[in-house]
Image (cartoon, helix red, strand yellow):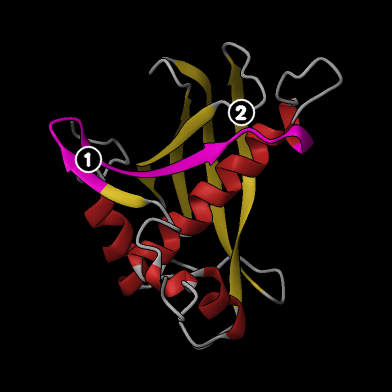
Amino acid sequence: MSDKAPTPQNWPDLSGRIIDDETGRRHVLPIRVYFEDTDAGGIAYHASYIRWCERGRTDFLRLLGTDARRLIDGSASVEPAAFVVRRMNCDFIRPTRMDDVLTVETRVKELGGASVTLIQTVIGPDGRRVFEAEVTVVLVAVSGKPLRLSTAIRSAFDGADAGKVLGSGAVRG
């Protein structure tokens, strides 16, 4: 046994990973359903899916080099800011249970001036969709005003987009 305890920096998939394949680019994050995530019947509680998607978005940002801490402390720009959820449309497709291992997939759908729309899909242990959400997040300054996405943030998200955002707001692909 090693005398060195593993640290989060040594765990390669702690933040999930970004995958490029024939379906495009997406962030994937494995999640296990714990007892605390379930209701009295052992079925994952609906709010758990919202938390899992938040983790997926946060780790996606981290792997793109635009993590939430740097935005909030202002080191990623001139003004401290954060991405906040403006809209979330959820589709609960089928239940999951305690001890299921799920995958949260996050894809960029569209970039706006101050916003990013993402598609987040939770995949069950059998490879089938169990939950899907379309989430629009807006970059907001600590003062509360929306901020335009910086070139660096836009480039990070644009590179993660399966298609490129066209001037009309539509997405190719």
Q: From the viewer's perspective, is 153 left or right of 84?
A: left
Give residue 170's quadrant in the image: top left
Dot 1 falls on a residue whose secondary structure is loop
Is residue 93 located in the magenta-colored stretch of the structure?
no
User: Which circle's residue, 1 or 2, is located before the other in the chain?
Assistant: 2
- In this rendering, the answer to whether 52 lies above or below 142 is above
Residue 99 is marked as 2
Residue drawn at x 56%, y 25% is 100
Is residue 31 located in the magenta-colored stretch of the structure?
yes
The residue segment tinted magenta is 19-36
Dot 2 falls on a residue whose secondary structure is loop
Image coordinates for residue 148, horizontal then vertical, percent:
46, 67
Q: From the viewer's perspective, is 26 left or right of 6?
A: left
Residue drawn at x 44%, y 57% is 15
Residue drawn at x 46%, y 81% is 3
- In this rendering, the answer to whether 48 lies above or below 44 is below
Q: Alpha-carbon neighbours of circle 2 within 10 Å: few (<14), some, or many (≥20)? A: some
Residue 162 is marked as 1
> Which residue is outermost to the front?
1
Q: From the viewer's perspective, is 157 left or right of 97?
A: left
